[in-house]
Image (cartoon, grey):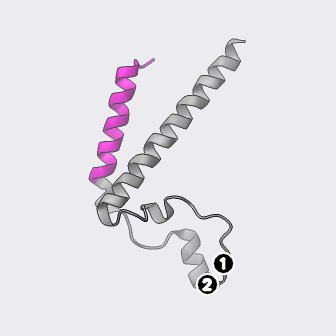
Amino acid sequence: MLSRYRWALVLVAIAGLTIVLLPFASELPDGLERVAEMFSFAGRERTLYTAPMRDYSLPWLSGFGGQAVAALVGIFVVSGLTFLLGKSIKRVRRS
């Protein structure tokens, strides 16, 4: 099992790798957007929920900085939720 220091190091390495690879992310539409364009129903969607970091960017910070901050926030949120889920599963298995 990795120590807390090593987990932090892994998380920092993942964040750094994300920042390095971020400029190479595709600007093309994803699969669902592509199918909606192909079958001409792209403009008829209804918004049920607006994501806080829609299109992997922040509305108040544009360009590479907004994408980088959104990516880092996403990494830390998912890592934190995964850590909490693992702790709760471990607690359930012990009892």
Quadrant of the drawing holding the N terminus = top left
Specify the label residue 45 is tagged with. Answer: 1
**Is 76 situated left or right of 63 in this image?**
right
Q: How crowded is mark 1: few (under 14 residues within 10 Å), some or many (20 or more)?
A: few
**Is 68 situated left or right of 92 in this image?**
left
What secondary structure is the stretch in magenta mostly built from? Answer: helix
Seen from this angle, which residue lies furthest bottom?
A: 40
Whether 89 is drawn above or below 73: the answer is above
Residue 42: give x, y in percent of width and height. Answer: 60, 82
Q: Mark 2 points at which residue?
A: 43
Whether 69 is drawn above or below 54: the answer is above
Residue located 39% across and 47% down the image: 72
Judge whether residue 13 is colored magenta: yes
Residue located 35% across and 21% down the image: 5
C-alpha span from label 2 to label 1: 6 Å
Judge whether residue 50 is colored magenta: no
Residue 70: give x, y in percent of width and height. Answer: 41, 54
Residue 84: give x, y in percent of width and height. Answer: 57, 29
Residue located 54% across and 76% down the image: 34
Helix or strand or loop: what does disc 1 sit on? loop
Residue type at mark 2 is: Gly
Residue type at mark 1 is: Glu
**Mark 2–mark 1 CB contact (< 8 Å):** yes
Residue 59: give x, y in percent of width and height. Answer: 43, 65
Quadrant of the drawing holding the C terminus = top right
What segment is highlighted magenta in the picture?
1-20
Q: How crowded is mark 2: few (under 14 residues within 10 Å), some or many (20 or more)?
A: few
Viewer-nearest residue: 58 or 29: 58
Residue 10, picture quadrant: top left
Seen from this angle, which residue lies furthest front?
A: 60
Residue located 53% across and 58% down the image: 52
Residue 47, picture quadrant: bottom right
